[in-house]
């Protein structure tokens, strides 16, 4: 972050699926985002720490510590931090309803938007049939996913040497496999139905690493994405507008601008 860059102020920020404790985590990108933004409320929508991977193979970079410290510092300075654990950080679920200063832990939250709409906020793994009923398959899929992310690391190392911006192999594959697209749609329908049952106007979730905002019937469905593939966040502007922030695209634009200046 340049010292002259203005800090972006939002009413609310939602981030999820950071997966601290894995090599695929884009902690540096997230740190940059956290430094350049402020909000009245910050929702951590699950899978912030990847307990599954840490149990298999311990990995914890300094940048992962820095992310935790930055979030704690925001809480100390007045940002209300709301943490809804996911399946990868399910070890925190027994601490639901815990409040430590300005940090709240709960399975789900209800967020009141500026325009009066109410949003259910939860990770969403509760509506993933594989996670609920075939955990062995979920762990197998997680292993395959991490193999893809490892390949993604080497692909992007080569792209950096050639002067190209970051590109997600796993996201590319996900959006071109019919079964993956059907899975995303079924998940979105199930989460939206839960919002309807709770009598709210919409839902914010994570889990499937696919950021989007769309209407499903009368329900506003929002997914804030992830910080291992797309580096996205959902924000509520001060005027109440919702937007998906694609942080990698911002850096890609800056890289292209520097290349043009150098040329």
Image (cartoon, rainbow, N blue to C red):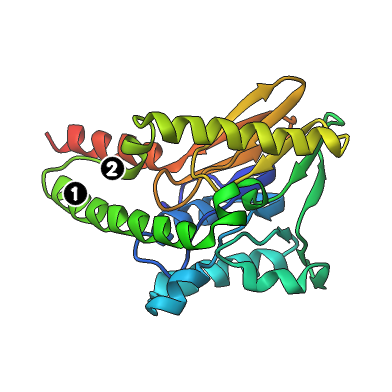
Q: Quadrant of residue 48?
A: bottom right
Q: Residue at x 41, y 51 (%)?
A: 2
Disc 1 + disc 2, Cβ < 8 Å: yes
Whether 143 is drawn above or below 262: the answer is below
Secondary structure beneath label 2: helix
Dot 1 alpha-carbon crowd within 10 angstroms: few under 14, some 14 to 19, many 20 or more: some
Q: Residue at x 74, y 30 (%)?
A: 239
User: Of the residues under marks 1 and 2, which one precedes in the sequence?
Assistant: 1
Residue that badge 1 annotates = 155
Q: Quadrant of residue 85?
A: bottom right
**Mark 1 vs mark 2, CA separation in Å:** 8 Å
Judge from the rendering whether residue 49 lies leftward or rightward of residue 163; answer left or right: right
Residue that badge 2 annotates = 169
Between 36 and 214, the residue placed more toward the observer is 214
Find residue 181 and report its horizontal and vertical position in percent.
46, 30
Q: Residue at x 68, y 53 (%)?
A: 43
Whether 12 is drawn above or below 62: the answer is above
Residue 15 visible in rendering: yes
Judge from the rendering whether residue 202 lies leftward or rightward of residue 147; answer left or right: right
């Amino acid at each position: 972050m340049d010292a002259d860059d203005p800090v972006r102020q939002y009413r609310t920020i939602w981030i999820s699926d950071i997966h601290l404790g894995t090599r695929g985590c884009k902690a540096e990108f997230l740190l940059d985002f956290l430094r350049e933004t402020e909000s009245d409320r910050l929702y951590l929508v699950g899978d912030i720490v990847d307990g599954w991977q840490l149990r298999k193979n311990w990995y914890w970079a300094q940048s992962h510590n820095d992310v935790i410290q930055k979030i704690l510092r925001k809480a100390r300075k007045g940002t209300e931090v709301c943490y809804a654990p996911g399946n990868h950080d399910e070890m925190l679920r027994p601490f639901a309803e815990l409040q430590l200063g300005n940090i709240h832990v709960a399975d789900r939250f209800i967020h009141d938007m500026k325009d009066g709409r109410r949003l259910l906020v939860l990770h969403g793994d509760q509506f993933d049939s594989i996670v609920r009923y075939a955990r062995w398959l979920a762990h197998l899929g997680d292993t395959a996913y991490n193999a893809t992310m490892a390949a993604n690391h080497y692909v992007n190392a080569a792209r950096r040497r050639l002067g190209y911006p970051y590109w997600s192999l796993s996201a590319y594959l996900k959006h071109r496999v019919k079964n993956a697209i059907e899975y995303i749609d079924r998940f979105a329908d199930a989460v939206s139905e839960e919002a309807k049952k709770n009598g709210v106007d919409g839902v914010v979730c994570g889990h499937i690493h696919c950021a989007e905002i769309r209407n499903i019937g009368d329900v506003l469905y929002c997914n804030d994405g992830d910080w291992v593939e797309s580096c996205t966040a959902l924000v509520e502007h001060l005027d109440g507008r919702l937007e998906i922030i694609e942080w990698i695209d911002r850096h890609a634009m800056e890289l292209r601008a520097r290349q043009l200046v150098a040329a």
